[in-house]
Image: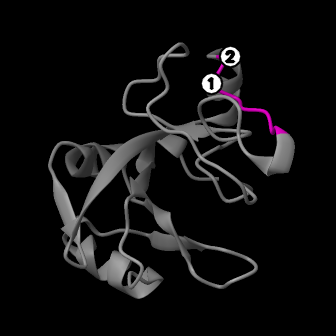
Amino acid sequence: MEDVRSKIFVGGLAAVTTNESLMAYFASFSPIEATVQMDRITGRSRGFGFVIFPTVELAQAVLSMPHVVDGKAVECKACVSKQDAREGGMVATRGPGGMMNAGGMQGGGCFRNPVPSAPSFQASGGGYEQGCGGG
């Protein structure tokens, strides 16, 4: 299992961004994998994805600079493990209609600075089994 610290969340992706274009954008950082999260029903991009790098240092280098993927400025954030998310109070619950009630993603989350009282990312709807979480 990869070190969750070498995995980043990329938010605000253009609707045209694909796994291939995301991988190509980060090619100079030698990514291992790039995945755009797709809506299971419509097949459309959900506007975010994840990129895994071979080292924590490469992931940190990516986080230290701004990025524009497929013509759109995106926000990159560090991922945290499921255990760290639970211990930090970042695990969310679902409310009516499947919407997330609390900050973070169920079972893990993506945060630049994980602060339980002020999470920087809130997700809504859909499944999160491919989220940032690690064991």
- In what element is the residue under mark 2? helix
- Relative horizontal placement of residue 29, taking residue 37 as reference (left or right): left
What label does residue 87 carry, if any? 2
Q: Position of residue 106 (x, y in %)?
A: 73, 40
Of residues 57 and 79, the one drawn nearer to the viewer in this rendering: 79
Q: Amino acid at mark 1?
A: Asp
What label does residue 118 carry, if any? none
How many marks on residues?
2
Q: Say whether residue 8 is magenta.
A: no
Residue density around tag 1, few if under 14, some if 14–19, many if 20 or more, within 10 Å: some
- Relative horizontal placement of residue 63, taking residue 16 as reference (left or right): left
Q: Amino acid at mark 2?
A: Glu
Q: Which residue is mark 1?
A: 84
Of residues 62 and 54, the one drawn nearer to the viewer in this rendering: 62
Q: Position of residue 36 (x, y in %)?
A: 51, 72
User: In the figure, 125 relative to 78: above or below?
Assistant: below
Q: Say whether residue 94 is magenta.
A: yes
In the image, what residue occupies the spot 44% across and 52% down?
9
- Relative horizontal placement of residue 40, taking residue 96 as reference (left or right): left
Q: Position of residue 128 (x, y in %)?
A: 71, 54
- In what element is the residue under mark 1? helix
In the image, what residue occupies the spot 29% across and 82% down?
24
